Image: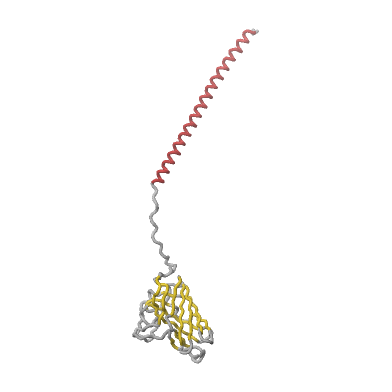
Amino acid sequence: MVSTTQTFFALFVLFTIVSAEATRFGALRSRSRRSHDNSRSRRSHDNSRSRRSHGHNSRSRRSQWSPPPTTPEVTCPPEVTCPPEKECENHVATMPVTCNDVQTHHGMWLGRQPGFQDSNTELWKGPIPLVTPAKFQEDGLDATLTGIVYDGTTYWKYDFEFHGLTTTGTGYYQNLGVGCIDTDKSDWLFYPVFNGTLLDLGPNGLSYSLEPRDGPHNPQIGIGASLLDTEYGISFWFEIPNTPVIGDVNLSLRCVSKV
């Protein structure tokens, strides 16, 4: 039989072995934690260096940045009609001296459609003179023309409003028998929209609306555009709606107020 002494000795040896293994295992875990911590520290340090390096490079790149080249001057795209440049916004409108050096009395002309020569007898026929120079005033792409004419018995005032000044249009030429030849129309300007009124300044107080007349002669402005001289001028056709009365305006323009 195993004695008590032998049993106690065997337990003591077993306890010693277990304690030694536990101590060794603890040391291994400690070294493992230190190694892990050191690894984390190195990664953190590397990341910090990477961030500093990135920030330095970013700052370096920013310090080397330069603005883009100056954008060229913007011009009007081909598909868009740019407003024409004007040098004058206020003019006096006068009756032209023709290319044959003859003073006209063409303040406003009225006529009748064929077959209606005896209609609207309250209105004159042919050209009548301006009493004083008319006023042509521009406002951006719009303009007004105001004049007073005298038919021998009655004073008449006309007011026109023009809209949408543009370089797009076809200049109209007509030989009016005053010695003027067809001229360069490339610099002419045009008003595609207009309307007006004709007012009897006498006791009758008659008033008529004036509208564009069918045909090629919309308001045109430029050198020779009056068709009666070679100066800067304006001309256009109009009609009195619901009547056979037609008319036109052919005037020279002289600048009195620069833009």
Q: Quadrant of residue 149?
A: bottom left
Q: Position of residue 129 (x, y in %)?
A: 43, 85
Q: Quadrant of residue 189?
A: bottom left
The image shows a total of numbered marks equal to 0
User: As rendered, which of 104 and 4 lies closer to the eye?
Assistant: 104
Q: Position of residue 147 (x, y in %)?
A: 45, 81
Q: Position of residue 230 (x, y in %)?
A: 35, 80
| Colour basis | secondary structure
Residue drawn at (44%, 78%) of the image: 135
Q: Quadrant of the C terminus?
A: bottom left
In this rendering, does residue 113 appear at all? no
Q: Quadrant of the N terminus?
A: top right
Q: Position of residue 20 (x, y in %)?
A: 55, 17
Farthest right residue?
Answer: 1
Asked if residue 189 is positioned above or below residue 39 in the image, the reply reads below
User: As rendered, which of 8 and 140 lies closer to the eye?
Assistant: 140
Q: Is 100 on the left or on the right of 13, as rendered?
A: left
User: As rendered, which of 254 and 84 lies closer to the eye?
Assistant: 254
Asked if residue 148 is positioned above or below residue 50 in the image, the reply reads below
Residue drawn at (36%, 77%) of the image: 184
Q: Is 5 on the left or on the right of 147, as rendered?
A: right
In this rendering, does residue 252 appear at all? yes
Q: Is 12 on the left or on the right of 153, as rendered?
A: right
